[in-house]
Amino acid sequence: TPPSAPAFKPVRRWPLKLIMVDAYIGLGSNLDDPQAHIIRALEELKQLPGSCLVGRSSLYVTSPVGPQSQPDYINAACRLGTELGAHDLLEQLQAIEHCHGRLREGEQWGPRTLDLDLLLYGSEIIDMPDLKVPHSELHRRCFVLQPLHEIAGDVVVPGHGSVSDLLAAADCNGVRKLDHD
């Protein structure tokens, strides 16, 4: 019988090249100084492991989609280059929301301190109970399309067309760019 071979132990002698994916994140807030929540969240997104903030939009004031008795929202979008998988990225986004006091109870489309939505993850289509990419309402929502257009007008939303074309067809009443942020 052959002598027993030692167990295989890989040796990493060079850095592995991981593939970066462009992920687009929608940001929204309408409670407890919403502009500060968005600015702070953008800073926190810069610190995600294996990720870098490539671009961000201006801030927009938008009317609420849900109950109209809530304050207006501040919305923005950003582009991340990330090595994180889609589910890992979602987990990181939810951790940031949690740090901002986000509660996932109450009425749908109700007020919130911070909402971070994974809008696009490369050109992938993901349809799972806990994650849908592209975001299911992205192609209809001007408060998402307007800031996204500012940083990625030519990006294609799988199954729907380019952000530019979608924005041209959207109702943008109640969305206005802030003069400064």
Image: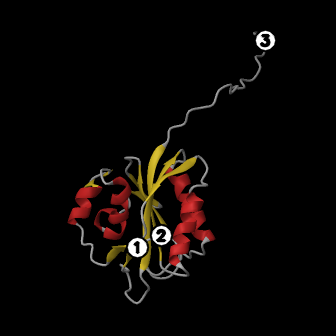
State the residue lying farthest toward the front. 179
Q: Position of residue 64 (x, y in %)?
A: 38, 80
Helix or strand or loop: what does disc 3 sit on?
Answer: loop
Q: Residue at x 53, y 54 (%)?
A: 89
For mark 1, give the secondary structure. loop
Residue at the far left: name it.
169
Reading the image, the residue beneath label 1 is: 178
What residue is shown with label 3? Answer: 3
- Vertical position of residue 174 compared to residue 8: above or below: below
Question: Of the residues shown, which amino acid type is indicated by label 3?
Answer: Pro
Q: Which residue was labeled with disc 2?
A: 181
Q: Amino acid at mark 1?
A: Leu
Q: Position of residue 4 (x, y in %)?
A: 78, 16
Query: Circles 1 and 2: CB distance less than 8 Å?
Result: yes
In three-dimensional space, the C-alpha distance between marks 1 and 2, rounded to whole angstroms, equals: 7 Å
Query: Quick one: SS at disc 2?
Result: loop
Q: Is residue 122 left or right of residue 142?
A: right
Which is nearer the eye, 166 or 33?
Answer: 33
Residue beneath the point at 37% across and 63% down: 147
104 sits to left or right of 24: right
